Image (cartoon, rainbow, N blue to C red):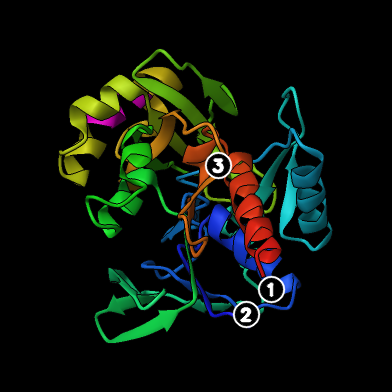
Amino acid sequence: MPKIAVIGAGMAGLTCARALGDHGLRPVIFDKGRGLGGRMATRRAEGGFQFDHGAQYLTARSRGFAEMLAGAEAAGALALWPEPRERPAYVGIPGMTGLAKHMGEELDIRKATRIQRIVPEDGHWRLDWQDGSERFDRLVIPSTAPQTAALLPEDHDFAEALHSVGMDPCLTLMVGLPTGADLPFVTRRAPEEDISWIACDSAKPGRPDGPCVVAQAGRGWSLRHLELELDAIAERMLPLVREIIGKGATVDPPYLSAHRWRYGLVTSPLGQPYLRDGAKTLFAGGDWCLGAKAEDAWTSGRAIADALIDGL
């Protein structure tokens, strides 16, 4: 049984590891964060506020992803969000991280472990982190294209392909509102404006009562303000949100915070499900291979798992 390491517990990494585990393999997942899910993220704050500050919801185009979502719904990890859309939209329960936790059940996941170096060693891969080191037969890196490039040597075979991928930032604002705040909508999408998306997160199923909104800045605004401190980002985004949802709801909000997704949006995907080295021991993938949706990450992770299994 080969030793397999997966660096990253987002949608692609969890999908790959889950498929490998279902085949009887025992992959080890490393993630630098304290939680799971990557951009399937949830933040909880005092006052009964809860924010899905990354991925807002999930929809399916393919049969395989639809079946996965249906299974997660049956297990209580997802719920249908009855917002009018072209396809059924699902949200995690009790937050978007609920799906990640469901996918990660019974997997060997080592949280808060940042891989500092990857070293090829006698046909294997040695992973070094602050407090340890371990060697593996196969390595999967389902991270963003820039983060994958940073882990590998500059002259690695993947370098040109990774640098061809375009990824843009997305700045996010979380606002806790006063009790009884009246909002003019549940969601608002305006891709060309400074605030491209606003959602009343407390309107999603299974959420706490504390009224709150998540706002995401458009590409141009995010690029112009990317390197500001988070408090400064929040101070500059709040007036833009206030103009849209009304001054009364956002005067002296009980909670205000910003988050920086440096590689939040895929603008120029690779055009294939994954990268693989000549020895078929190193794989890289994620949503950046195929598109900007969670389903693209799932498709990439599943394709990597299938390739690994076929090579055994």
On screen, residue 31 above or below 135: above
Magenta stretch bounds: 236-241
On screen, residue 180 above or below 43: above
Callout 3, which amino acid? Answer: Asp
Q: Is residue 142 left or right of residue 131?
A: right
Q: Dots 2 and 1: beta carbons under 8 Å?
A: yes
Q: Where does label 1 land, which residue? A: 21
- Among numbered discs 2 and 1, the one appearing first in the sequence: 1
Answer few, some or many: residues within 10 Å of disc 3's Cα (few below 14, many 20 plus, some between 14 and 19). many
Q: Is residue 226 left or right of residue 89?
A: left
Q: Where does label 3 land, which residue? A: 201
**Cα gap from disc 2 to disc 1, whole angstroms:** 6 Å
**Cα gap from disc 3 to disc 1, whole angstroms:** 34 Å
Q: Secondary structure at mark 1?
A: helix
Callout 2, which amino acid? Answer: Arg
Q: Secondary structure at mark 3?
A: helix
Answer few, some or many: residues within 10 Å of disc 2's Cα (few below 14, many 20 plus, some between 14 and 19). some
On screen, residue 128 above or below 237: below
Q: Where does label 2 land, which residue? A: 26
- Among numbered discs 3 and 2, the one appearing first in the sequence: 2
